[in-house]
Image (cartoon, rainbow, N blue to C red):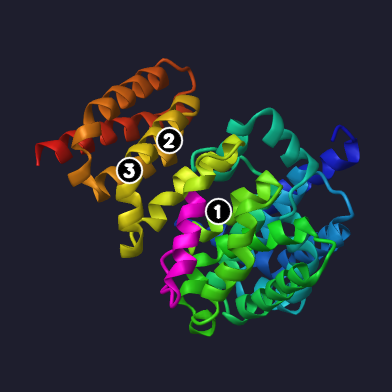
Amino acid sequence: HSNPWWKAQKWCIQICHKLIAIRARNDDTGSTEQFLREFLAKYAVPIQEAILVRLGKLQGGKGYIPPRIVAYSFLYLTEAILPSVTYKALVPHIEQFLETVLFPVMFFTSEDQEIWDSDPQEFIRREHDIVHDDLTPKKVALEFLYELVTQRSKTHMLAFVQFLIAKLQQYQQSDAKNFQDKYAALTIFCTLSTKLKAAEEFAGQLEEFVAVHVLSEMKSKFGFIRSKACWAFCLFSDIEFRNPEIFLHGLRSTLACMQDSELPVQIVAGIGLKFAINSELAEPIIIENLPQILELYLKLLSEMDNDELISALEYVIIRFQEHIGPHALQLLHNFWQVFLRIISEDEEDATGLASLECLRAILVVLTSISE
């Protein structure tokens, strides 16, 4: 990354992103609005074409471009979705770009594996911490994809999802499993979960997706696959299951993932459980196992301060507040200890939300037992 050529490219793409991100402001001269018109008319499309050519080097996941350049390139393309002039120039490239460039960006890289092994807490912060300002290619590429299917034609999503389904079917039928394809496909399905659940075209297919492509991977030999499959089940757990056993299998597997041998899998399961417990089917199992579930949450909170994890436990308490009484004292003690530990740390931005969630959780426990 110290190569002067890469550094020059990084600064060029950053400047280009700043330019296309300019929004016209009211001023006496109108110069900002005029500049934006000129930039879009003369320069935005050629810059976009150059970016697409550069990112094309990543096709198939074999090329290399420094992550910062990839991230700022996707940021530029995200800003190019709304202006009609840049979007029209982008349309002919979208299908191939999504399949050959964006899809491989979702692969679980050697850097991901290194962080997973050496600093699992950092891995979770990158994946599930909304205040963790990390400009990674994955995160920015997924933002580009979500903006594309939100702001523009649904046909982009329909075509890309068919490509993903073909990848999943190929994985299912092959003896030599391509776990990178599976991880990337599940990652994108998770990002598009709200869109897919709202689309009539996929209404009858999502239960099969969960049954065939998700549940089996919750026992994968790879921790990163177990984690992603668990997250996928939780995000799709609110669909209408014609076969209740599929949901119950996923719920039990999620509870099992909370006891996984690898911390990221445990944390993801703990965060995701709040999505699954809204179903009436979940109630008997959660009530039966509530003491163990609360104990698992408290154990996880002793290992990592994460506002999403605290929020998930808070939701469990609210959802089953009539059963919380016997556990209230232990919960209050642990939340207070976590709060004291958090406020003693130096990183204010990273711990602010977690400390707030602790105080909210204490209030929720007190409210539940007072009622």
Query: Three-letter amino acid code at disc 3?
Result: Leu
Counting residues from the N terminus, which is met first, the one under dot 3 or under dot 1? 1
Q: For the residue labelled by badge 1, is the local secondary structure a helix, a strand or a loop?
A: helix
Query: Three-letter amino acid code at disc 1?
Result: Cys
Q: For the residue labelled by badge 2, is the local secondary structure a helix, a strand or a loop?
A: helix
Q: Nearer the viewer, residue 53 or 187?
A: 187
Q: Residues within 10 Å of mark 2 (few under 14, many from 20)?
A: some
Counting residues from the N terminus, which is met first, the one under dot 3 or under dot 2? 3
- Looking at the image, can residue 35 be seen? no
| Measured Cα–Cα span from mark 3 to mark 2 | 10 Å
Which quadrant holds the C terminus? Answer: top left
Q: Nearer the viewer, residue 266 or 340?
A: 266
Q: Please check the rendered image and state whether residue 253 is part of the magenta-colored stretch, yes or no.
A: yes
Q: For the residue labelled by badge 3, is the local secondary structure a helix, a strand or a loop?
A: helix
Q: Please check the rendered image and state whether residue 307 is part of the magenta-colored stretch, yes or no.
A: no
In the figure, residue 135 lies in which quadrant? top right
> Which residue was labeled with disc 1?
230
Q: Nearer the viewer, residue 168 or 83?
A: 168
> On the rendered structure, is 177 left or right of 352?
right
> On the rendered structure, is 288 left or right of 99?
left
Q: Residue reaching furthest left?
A: 371
How would you classify the magenta stretch by its main secondary structure?
helix
Q: Residues within 10 Å of mark 3 (few under 14, many from 20)?
A: some
> Which residue was labeled with disc 2?
296
> Which residue was labeled with disc 3?
290
Q: Residues within 10 Å of mark 1 (few under 14, many from 20)?
A: many
User: Residue at left 49%, top 61%?
Assistant: 249
Counting residues from the N terminus, which is met first, the one under dot 2 or under dot 1? 1
Q: Nearer the viewer, residue 62 or 236?
A: 236
What label does residue 265 carry, if any? none
Horizontal and vertical percent position of residue 68: 74, 43
